[in-house]
Image: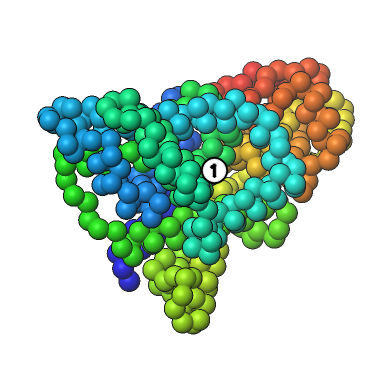
Amino acid sequence: MRRGAWVGLLGFVAALAVELHASADTLTELTRPFSEALRNGSYAGALGLIFLAGLATSLTPCVYPMIAITVSVFGARQAESRGKAALLSTAFVLGIAALFTPLGVVSALTGSAFGSALASPWVVGALAALFTVMALSMFGLFDMALPSGLQNRLAQAGGFGVRGAFVLGFVNGLIAAPCTGPVLAVLLTWVATTGHVGFGALGLFVYAIGIGVLFWVVGTFAISLPKSGRWVEWTKSVFGIAMLALAFYYLRGLLPYPRPHVRDQIWLAVALGLVAGGVIVGAVHLSFKGGPLMLRVRKAVGVVACVAGILGVVGYAEALPPGSHITWTEDFHAGKSIALTQGRPMMVDFGADWCGACQELERDVLSDPRVVAEAQRFVAVRVDLSTDQATEEKWELLKNYEQPGLPLVVLHHSDGSEAARVTGMLESDDFLEMMGDVR
């Protein structure tokens, strides 16, 4: 098996597990940056993966073959000094960043609305359809591109010098839309779920730097890159598999999506075996364009196996850790009545399968053995707002708490009054202290 195909797809499996806030024991080191990013500002791991996504985008057929030509257009290779070449190359990369960074700000500002919208089957269906169309484009079944006349006009914008390099960088993102679009859509979707403006802007800026790093290296040091070839098409196949996996992931509340409730090592082994088998069969190195029918069938079988395997890895990563867990009641009013009658405190957990922070709280905090033990004195109520479980009554309960979105965990004293609430990630020790104060 070709090493490039293995490295590309296995790298994607790890990145996808991280992006979906997985915290499986075997993926702990990869997922930790995402788990802690919004809690304590540890953004390094997350931003590193975003940078790699940008770098991978620059290796696609829409971008890679044009690097040397584009560098020559803004004059870096003809510059009289290394410093001048670096300045022009930097201006070009900053032009790319100027296009993408505002998108991160807009996505983050609309984050809460986006998160609530994910409860709608129409929204998740539209997202899944969008990612499927992008996947088919990545596999080469059709091309998404700007009209050639518009591409030529954009390429001539800005003139020469630093200003020209900056403008050319800005429009370069538009010219490369067929390959940046799918990755950008996934990244913007993830940024929207965080709702953090600063991180949204920084994430898209880092993505732009990843796209531009090869332009900068070639322009500054006048080196020659390896010629494009089959490996460039492999990169597009990896992105296509990514799009399909995300499409089915968004539909997990509408379609059957087998996944373990508790982490099972056999489940993980089977999922990884599907990914490996899919790569061997031809998910990455074969093509849907031309060639014998049997080779295209092999690629289709390989893609299906890889997508199924990736979803299996994500399902394992999202499952609860082994051990005892809190016993929940689904009836809010019955739980409240029991708590008041028996003089017990009550814990209400609002969650949903589309809420990454909710799942993270469940795995990392509410499944802590110490929290499980302390919860035995509480009446534990869960209000499930997943796409296939949400009702108007459940949404009304959330509205009664005057909480605009998820996650939300509310602790009540035994007299029914509110003692504390959790609206984001926190450490298990902090939550235990909050529980201990409830009477």
Residue 392 horizontal side relative to residue 11, left or right: right
Q: Nearer the viewer, residue 127 or 141?
A: 141
The amino acid on which the numbered mark 1 sits, given as a three-letter code, is Ala
Residue 41 horizontal side relative to residue 340, left or right: left
Query: Where in the figure is residue 43, as x and y percent of width and height?
Result: 41, 30
Q: Residue at x 54, y 43 (%)?
A: 185
Query: Where in the figure is residue 238, as x and y percent of width and height?
Result: 44, 58
Report the number of discs.
1
Q: Which residue is mark 1?
A: 185
Query: Where in the figure is residue 285, as x and y percent of width and height?
Result: 39, 68
The quadrant in which residue 231 appears is bottom left
Q: Is residue 9 above or below residue 172?
A: below
In the picture, the quarter occupied by the C terminus is top right
Would you say residue 74 is visible in this rendering?
A: yes
Q: Secondary structure at mark 1?
A: helix
Q: Nearer the viewer, residue 49 or 287?
A: 287
